[in-house]
């Protein structure tokens, strides 16, 4: 078994809960009521995508760490 690590984006949702995105694996979009639940769902989804890709001899991409920047603008209302 090979070990893989992927950066994930954990986004809090206005109504509660969290959405998880994996930039290196765009197929992975999941959510959970808590951070822990959302990350557990992400692990399951990542595993499923890796199995799918491996079974079909598709590339498993390297991690793409997110780069987060803040942009401030002034706009008229």
Image (spheres, rainbow, N blue to C red):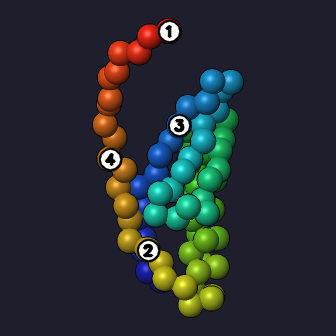
Crowd around label 4: few <14 · some 14–19 · many ≥20 (10 Å):
few
Q: Is residue 37 visible?
A: no
Q: Report the residue marked by disc 2.
A: 61
Mark 4 → mark 2, Cα distance in angstroms: 17 Å
Q: Dot 3 lies on which element? A: strand
Mark 3 → mark 1, Cα distance in angstroms: 27 Å
- The outermost residue toward the front is 76
Q: Report the residue marked by disc 4.
A: 67
N-terminal label among 3 and 1: 3
Q: Is 20 rendered above or below residue 51?
A: above
N-terminal label among 4 and 3: 3
- Camera-side residue of 74 and 52: 74
N-terminal label among 2 and 1: 2
Q: Is 37 rendered above or below residue 27?
A: above
- Camera-side residue of 12 and 36: 12
Crowd around label 3: few <14 · some 14–19 · many ≥20 (10 Å):
some
Comparing labels 4 and 3, the label whose residue is closer to the camera:
4
Q: Residue at x 43, y 74 (%)?
A: 61
Q: Report the residue marked by disc 3.
A: 11
């Amino acid at each position: 078994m090979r070990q893989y690590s992927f950066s994930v984006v954990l986004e809090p949702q206005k109504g509660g809960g969290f959405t998880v995105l994996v930039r290196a694996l765009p197929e992975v979009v999941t959510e959970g009521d808590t951070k822990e639940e959302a990350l557990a769902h992400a692990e399951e989804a990542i595993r499923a995508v890796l199995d799918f890709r491996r079974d079909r001899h598709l590339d498993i991409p390297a991690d793409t760490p997110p780069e987060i920047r803040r942009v401030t603008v002034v706009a008229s209302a």
